[in-house]
Amino acid sequence: MVSRRGAIRSLLAVGLASNTALSGCLYIAGADRVKAPLVFVSRKNRITAEDATHVVRTIDELRSALSERGATVWLPSDVKIRFEDTTTTPVPIASNVTLASDRGVDGGQGALIESTAYHPTIFQSRKSDIRVTGIRIKGPQMEYFDPRTKSKAESAFYARAFEFIGNGIEIDHCELFGWTSAAVSLGGQDDPTESRIHHNSIHHNQMQTLGYGLDIRNGTHLIEWNYFDRNRHSVAGFGHRQNGYEARFNVVGPHAVRHAFDMHGLSENLSGYSGPLAGKYIRVHHNVFELTDAAAVVLRGISDRPSWVRENWCAAVPLLELKGRRSIIRQTHADAPENFQVSDNHFGPKAVKRGRSWLLEHDTSVRYEH
């Protein structure tokens, strides 16, 4: 049997060659335009209550179950677990654990895990082969704000749902919203890791200075079939030499705080480094970008290996200079494009419609509802 870590590594290696398989069974449904305009659901490899080794309803039960290696922990759809203070966090997760509920299974909404206080991190693990699936995870602040204008230190407002510093991490069919630092952080300064993040709705993570949907801190990661909106950055790379990601088949909604996908220059984040390095690579293809007042993709330096942005659909038109905006897809901190190719992208009001049609045409089991 192939481990989750091995399966993710195979997906990362396949890259564009896997386009013919795509999602298997993808359902794109219209939803509340305020909360999450699109929901991506695959009916393959879903966890149900019958698979569970533990059924939990309280924080204490959850903490105990997640500490057991190999556990499959089920939260019934009607469960609401609330973290009200920092004394109960972070909650560690053992290796080979699956945390699951029924979001997207036969109309299930998924259990809700909610934080009403600013916690640096709710769930934290250095272990490998962990899956989180079908859960709603809500942070303490959905609105945009700038912590630098507050009387408290910026760190007093940090809140993050998950920090994983292990390999073989899979997060799917979850709704992650209201987190000020990041909904999910992956990898560590000395820990390049691998993960697959798919079929999620990641929105309203928009605090100024941070506000990341996915904080890709190190390692190489696959990001596909997600919906993003109202994040300061939906995907942000830290910039380490082994830090990269492939983002494909995602939709980014129209409400921009700043640009959607990026890779930081390492000098922006690592004290004492002053070179132009900006990660291992970014490879961004077949995504729909609905935002029009911020860039879609920004490479903030020079990647160690070739980066490219191809065959995406952007509602904005490049080089309009509206509100001082520059190109929709761009590289900064480089005198000329270096290790960065931009080709075959589509722009303008009709591009989004064509992108949605492309998703339908390339998987016969896809169904789209307005």
Image: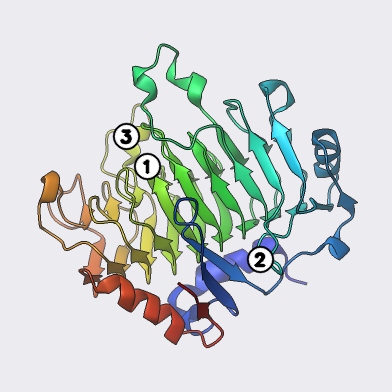
Contact between marks 1 and 3 (CB within 8 A): the answer is no
Amino acid type, residue under disc 3 in the picture:
Glu
- At x 79% / y 35%, what residue is drawn? 59
Tag 1 secondary structure: loop
Give residue 300's mark: none
Q: Looking at the picture, how far across and down is residue 276, in whole percent?
A: 26, 43
Looking at the rendered image, the quarter that the N terminus falls into is bottom right
The numbered mark, 1 or 3, whose residue comes first in the sequence reads 1
| Screen quadrant of the C terminus | bottom left
Could you tell me residue 285's position as x and y percent? 36, 69
- Which quarter of the figure has residue 64? top right
* Amino acid on which the number 2 mark rests in the picture: Gly
Q: CA distance from mark 1 to mark 2?
A: 32 Å
Q: Mark 3 highlights which residue?
A: 268
Residue beneath the point at 52% across and 71% down: 28
Residue at position x 56%, y 35% in the image: 160
Residue at mark 1: 232
